[in-house]
Image (cartoon, helix red, strand yellow):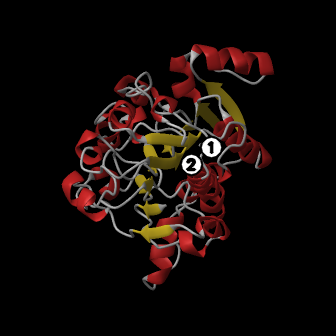
């Protein structure tokens, strides 16, 4: 098959063990990002299979209608960036392994790293010593602090293990269903949503973004956080109400460590989430490790091979699949 891979910004995939799975296919890798559907269609017009790099490119009718040769979109995990009805209308199968069971340890490690970097002022200290100075200030210790994990899922569970190992206290908040599971497991739940935000030294978000969770964290929630508390978001920017975090940060009362943004890649150097001294920003690297890429793209390439063999897997819109006679 003619396979086009989008948004492999550092040309990493061809260096991974899983890339061998595409042997025998005609593979084109694009190492930049093209957001314009018309221009992107001109690039990938010969593609029979399109590989998506997480949510870096949105796929809608404007693009799909220009790709008559496209048969398969192969990706992994959730797909809010893909218009599934438009795929179906254009006869394109979406395959996406939802990878039940295993958390993204890379994202969990990134969450811990952001907490440590923010509390110990690591970016500021590095900048200070590199500029010829010495210590730049006094950090804080994580041990004994209360970590509030919003979202009772696999990544949050991994973060809880890491945090407990360094002596942090854990409390949880989640949807009604999530709180029921947490209660059944005997973990510590906050008395209320208000208490969760008010009594957590650090609040870390671990929720999937879907229509029902968009804007879930409100300006009132952030206002309930105690002075000098830290909000960590390695999940999705859309979980926070538009503008709410920027407005709260502008008051200089709380801190934030964010790996996700409303518009990515974010290159607006005037954006307050990049400029405010109380914010530690990173460019959506929670999942960006060689190990995680090899795990994820092994599944993605398996989906391509299964389709090529006439037996597609992980079909999201199976109604478009017409087996070869």
Above or below — where is 93 with respect to 177?
Answer: below
Residue 158 pos. (x, y %) = 71, 43
Q: Residue at x 45, y 48 (%)?
A: 73
Are the residues at dot 1 and dot 2 in contact (C-beta closer than 8 Å)?
A: yes
Look at 28% across and 37% down and name the residue there. Answer: 247
Left or right relative to 205: residue 67: left
Whether residue 320 is situated above or below residue 270 in the rendered picture: above
SS at mark 1 in the image: loop
On the image, numbered disc 1 is attached to which residue? 311
Q: Is residue 136 visible?
A: no
- Closest to the observer: 153 or 51? 51
Task: Compute the Cα span from label 1 to label 2.
Answer: 5 Å
Query: Horizontal and vertical percent for residue 23?
Result: 60, 70
Q: Quadrant of the C terminus?
A: top right
Residue that badge 2 annotates: 307
Q: Residues within 10 Å of mark 1 (few under 14, many from 20)?
A: few
Front-most of residues 309 and 266: 309
Q: What is the tally of numbered marks visible in this picture?
A: 2
Residue 30 visible? The answer is yes
- Residue 40: x percent and y percent? 26, 58
What residue is drawn where x is 40% and y is 25%?
A: 211
Q: Residues within 10 Å of mark 2 (few under 14, many from 20)?
A: many
Q: Identify the residue at horizontal 46%, vertical 72% (top origin).
A: 10
Q: Is residue 323 left or right of residue 109?
A: left
């Amino acid at each position: 098959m003619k396979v086009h891979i989008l948004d492999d910004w550092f040309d990493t995939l061809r260096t991974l063990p899983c890339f061998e799975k595409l042997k025998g296919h005609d593979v084109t890798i694009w190492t930049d990002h093209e957001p314009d559907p018309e221009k992107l269609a001109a690039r990938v017009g010969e593609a029979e299979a399109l590989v998506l790099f997480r949510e870096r490119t949105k796929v809608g009718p404007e693009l799909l209608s220009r790709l008559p040769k496209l048969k398969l979109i192969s990706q992994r995990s959730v797909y809010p960036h893909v218009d599934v009805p438009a795929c179906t209308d254009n006869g394109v199968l979406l395959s996406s392994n939802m990878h039940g069971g295993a958390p993204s340890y890379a994202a969990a490690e990134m969450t811990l790293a952001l907490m440590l970097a923010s509390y110990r002022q690591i970016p500021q200290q590095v900048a200070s010593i590199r500029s010829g100075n010495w210590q730049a200030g006094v950090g804080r210790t994580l041990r004994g602090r209360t970590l509030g994990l919003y979202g009772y899922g696999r990544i949050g569970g991994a973060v809880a293990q890491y945090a407990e190992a360094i002596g942090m206290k854990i409390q949880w908040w989640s949807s009604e269903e999530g709180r029921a599971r947490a209660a059944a497991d005997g973990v510590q739940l906050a008395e209320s949503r208000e208490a969760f935000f008010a009594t957590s030294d650090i609040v870390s978000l671990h929720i999937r973004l879907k229509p029902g969770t968009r804007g879930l964290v409100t300006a009132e929630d952030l206002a309930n956080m105690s002075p000098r508390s830290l909000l960590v978001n390695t999940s999705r920017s859309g979980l926070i109400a538009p503008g709410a975090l920027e407005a709260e940060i502008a008051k200089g009362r709380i801190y934030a460590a964010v790996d996700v943004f409303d518009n990515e890649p974010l290159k607006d150097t005037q954006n307050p989430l990049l400029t405010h001294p109380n914010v530690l920003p990173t460019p959506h690297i929670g999942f960006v490790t060689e190990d995680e890429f090899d795990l994820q793209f092994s599944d993605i390439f398996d989906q391509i091979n299964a389709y090529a063999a006439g037996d597609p897997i992980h079909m999201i819109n199976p109604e478009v699949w017409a087996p070869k006679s």
